[in-house]
Amino acid sequence: QVLPPTTYLGGVAGWFGGSSNAELSSKYQTLITPAASFFGYIWGLIFLFQGFFAAAQVLPQYRNHPMVQDGISIMYFIVCSAQAAWTILFGYELMIPAFASIVVVLISLLAILRMQWNVAWDIERRMRKEDFSAIAQDNSTIHTDNNTTMNDGNANRPSNNDTDTNGEIDYEFLMAEPPRLPYWLLRFPFSLHAGWITPATSLMLSVLLVSLEVSIEIELWAAVLGVAMIFGLSMGLLLRQDSGAPVYSFPGTVAYASFGIMWELMAPSDDILGRHDEASINLVKNVAGFSGVCLIVTMVSRFVALFLRDRMCRRKDGEEEESEYEDGNVVEIGYVQV
């Protein structure tokens, strides 16, 4: 819990004797360096939510939560350690080890997202299996007693400490899906952090290339390909059809970074103007702007489409439920108790 504020103060204020992030960003200007104001806002938000996580994970109701025990485990310590190492190494302009450190941060964050997704998927499979078992038991009871005996499908459900007021397992709490509070405390901080570290890793590669004084062409194509690849990754998270999709926080953060790049290139620094021609600057600016706009439009349209679909499904289910009840009696259709 000490590492995140140490990282923040070291990077923003240069407490460890090195230069601050803002000073080094100005010194090693690249084509994909976001505007300086974008850095301060996002890092403040990242460390704020990680502070919420650090406080929540010691509370009794979250201490043994599967998203903490199985979805994060020791990986958060690795993230914080590598982030602190990056802050110190970058402050002293040790670019190669600093780049290696931020790659470790990225891999660890992506590992956390994957582990948490696996936890949610396992819980959902368990929930479906339990529901199917309850339905099968109901049908068995109905047919054994010649449709005269009915049992409660919840009677034989397992119970554990993660139960609601009715004594049933609160699967939504365990899965930590939005908009439940566990999502904002246990999953959102890492999705937000990963969404920023992904373009930051591409930026760190460009900073490394600038410090090594490579050719302008290599720097240009590293910047363009980095933005394009991150855009493709974000679109994939938005357009997924499997359980838990789509993911909005990661692509939203990438869109934020893309707008920061575009904003900076609308009035590029003298260093950028001296190293790159207008065509190269406009290319990166347009690619970043296109990526940001496409991600925002896709996020909004996907959210609206899924919201309308879920609302129509709930309305249809309600109408079917009303139509299947006659005089307060349950009607059996297709061997399934409705």
Image (cartoon, rainbow, N blue to C red):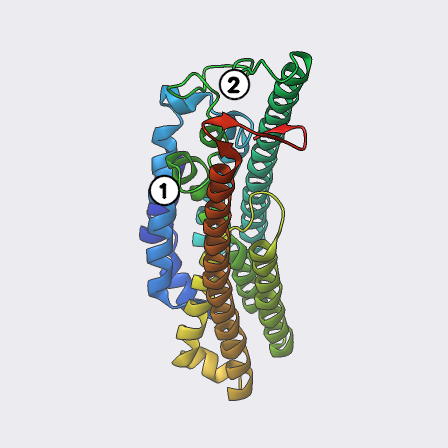
Q: Which residue is mark 2?
A: 154
Q: Residue 180: where, in percent of width, then height?
A: 39, 37
**Residue 311 higher or lower than 284, as above or below:** above
Label 1: element kind: helix
Query: In this orientation, which residue lies closer to the viewer: 103 or 44?
Result: 44
Circles 1 and 2: CB distance less than 8 Å? Answer: no
Q: Residues within 10 Å of mark 1 (few under 14, many from 20)?
A: many
Quadrant including the N terminus:
top left
**Helix, strand or loop at disc 2?**
loop
- Toward the viewer: 45 or 146? 146
**Label drawn at residue 325:** none
The Cα atoms of the two marked residues, 1 and 2, are separated by 37 Å
Q: Is residue 58 shown left or right of residue 152?
A: left
Q: Position of residue 145 (x, y in %)?
A: 64, 12
Is 258 in front, or is 316? 316
Label 1 vs 2, first from the N-terminus: 1
Q: In this view of the protein, can residue 65 be seen by the observer?
A: yes
Tell me the residue that label 1 is attached to. 49
Describe residue 55's horizontal placement relative to residue 189 as left or right: left
Residue 16 in sight here: no
Farthest front residue in view: 327
Quadrant in the rendering for residue 156 = top right
Taking the image as shown, residue 14 lies to the left or right of residue 110, namely left
Residue at screen point 48% across, 21% down = 169
Pair 1/2: label in front: 2
Name which residue lies at 39% across and 40% down.
184
How crowded pointer 2 is (Cα within 10 Å; few <14, some 14-19, many 20+) is rated as some
Task: Look at 37% across and 36% down and name the residue there.
Answer: 181
Q: Amino acid at mark 2?
A: Asn
Q: Amino acid at mark 1?
A: Phe
Quarter of the picture containing the C terminus is: top right
Residue at (55%, 87%) from the top-left corner? 279
